[in-house]
Amino acid sequence: MKGLRFSKVGSLAALGVAAALLPALLSVAGCGGNSTTTTTSAVAPSSTTTTSVATSESSDTTDTTGTTAVADTTTTSGIVIDMTTTTSLAETTTTTEALSSAEKVLANGHIKAMGFIDKVYVSGGKRYIRIDYAEMLTGQAAINAAAKDGVTLDGDWYISNSSHTKRTFEVSGTVAITTSTRWVGGTEKMNAPCTWNAFKSFWGSQGALNDSEKHLHKSPWWIERSGQVVVKIDEQYLE
């Protein structure tokens, strides 16, 4: 098209190509002896510069248009929060019940012990017993304990009761109770079932008891408890 001129730089700028890609120096020869020189300074990578090119009709005139370097500006918008995550480990404390030397833990986790019961009662709708632990010893352990207490054995067993510490436990409403020396109403057998009311009566008025029941409040009893609740009570048979 006659009368319209383009330099290479001018055409690139019109197409929106980033000035950062332009060479440091471009020299383009014009028609009829005219010349156009474009000088480009270093431009930061993130800036876009538009280059302006001037042409002259005079063969003796050189027009130089410069492009000034544009500073790269970085803008951060919003709020940046640096959060430090702290992991808290929960501390678990397990408390194990300290057992008496008269107690032992069964395979089912229950605790079994023998002792002398001195009180059986009901309070607040719940059943309770109070017991003084003792230890059933045999063999040399029985001989040694008896000698320490000043007792001469006529058998191979001995009940040692040295602490006299009394412990109170709640009794389950479904407790299983047995006797082995109570000969009343068809109970003439070892490990005979006994009701809670009958068991409780052994620590009541002796006048209301059968002759074979009057000694039971003095007999040693085995108790089995789940936690602090007694679930089983058995009379220890003594010859």
Image: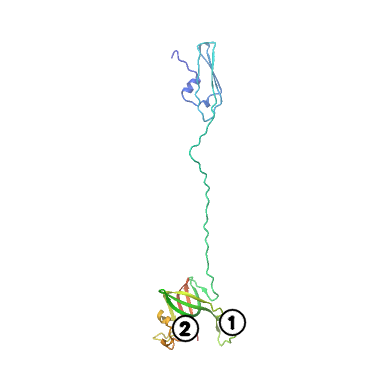
Residue at (45, 76) in percent of width and height: 128
Instruction: Identify the element where label 2 is drawn.
Output: helix
- The answer, for residue 195, to whether it is visible in the render is no
Amino acid of disc 1 = Ala
Q: CA distance from mark 1 to mark 2?
A: 24 Å
Instruction: Please tell me which residue is depicted at 52% across the width and 74% down the height of the picture.
Output: 104
Disc sitting over residue 67 in the figure? none
Image: 187 above or below 91:
below
Q: Nearer the viewer, residue 73 or 102?
A: 73
Task: Please name whichever residue, 91 or 123, is drawn nearer the observer in this view of the structure.
Answer: 123
Residue most toward the bottom? 211
Residue 43 figure quarter: top right
For mark 1, what is the residue? 145
Element on which disc 1 rests: helix
Q: Position of residue 216 (x, y in %)?
A: 46, 84
Q: Residue at x 47, y 80 (%)?
A: 119
Residue 145 appearing in the image: yes
Residue 147 lies, with reference to residue 44, above or below; the image says below
The scheme the figure's colours follow is rainbow
The relative height of residue 125 versus residue 55 in the rendered view (above or below) is below
- Residue 217 is labelled as 2
In the rendered view, does 199 fall on the left or right side of 103?
left
